[in-house]
Amino acid sequence: MSPLLATWLLLAISVACEVLGNVALRYADGFTRPIAAAAAVTCFLASVWLMSITMRKIELGVTYAVWAAGSTAITACVGVGLYDESLTGSKVAGVALVVLGVIVLSSGAG
């Protein structure tokens, strides 16, 4: 595997950690449930650590945009799929615009 491909894989794992942290945070109930709270903190720390490693090879702006947009889009899908959160046209359009913005930003990376 090429070093750049490995870096993108690390970024994907970082996004997954962020999403898992968000799910754990939902169960932490304002940090009154210690196991869920510890899981959330651990996932968030892992996510930021992995993202910082990816910045060795991928530009800061692209790294953060992919991380933030990826975790936002996936978390929104998890909310709809697992927790019966509403799925409106404006939510779909918003997520689509975020993803489109990342694509445009990434295409201009040098």
Image (tube, rainbow, N blue to C red):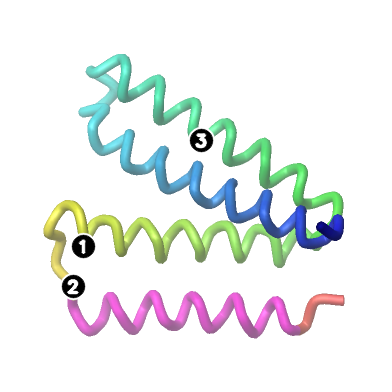
Image location (x, y in percent) of residue 24: 32, 34
Contact (CB < 8 A) between labels 1 and 2?
A: yes
Determine the CA span between mark 1 and mark 2: 6 Å
Q: Nearer the viewer, residue 90 or 80?
A: 80
Q: Based on the displayed image, in which of its 4 quarters is residue 22 positioned?
A: top left
Image location (x, y in percent) of residue 43: 49, 33
Label 3 secondary element:
helix
**Above/below status of 15 relative to 46:** below
Q: Which residue is mark 1?
A: 80
User: What is the quadrant of the C terminus in the image?
Assistant: bottom right
The amino acid type, in three-letter code, at marker 3 is Phe
Dominant secondary structure (helix, strand or loop) of the stretch shown in magenta: helix
Q: Which residue is mark 3?
A: 44
Q: Which residue is mark 2?
A: 87
The amino acid type, in three-letter code, at marker 1 is Val
Tell me where the magenta segment starts and ends, as one range.
88-107
Q: Is residue 83 magenta?
A: no
Q: Earlier in the sequence, mark 3 or mark 2?
A: 3
Q: Is residue 94 magenta?
A: yes
User: What is the quadrant of the N terminus in the image?
Assistant: bottom right
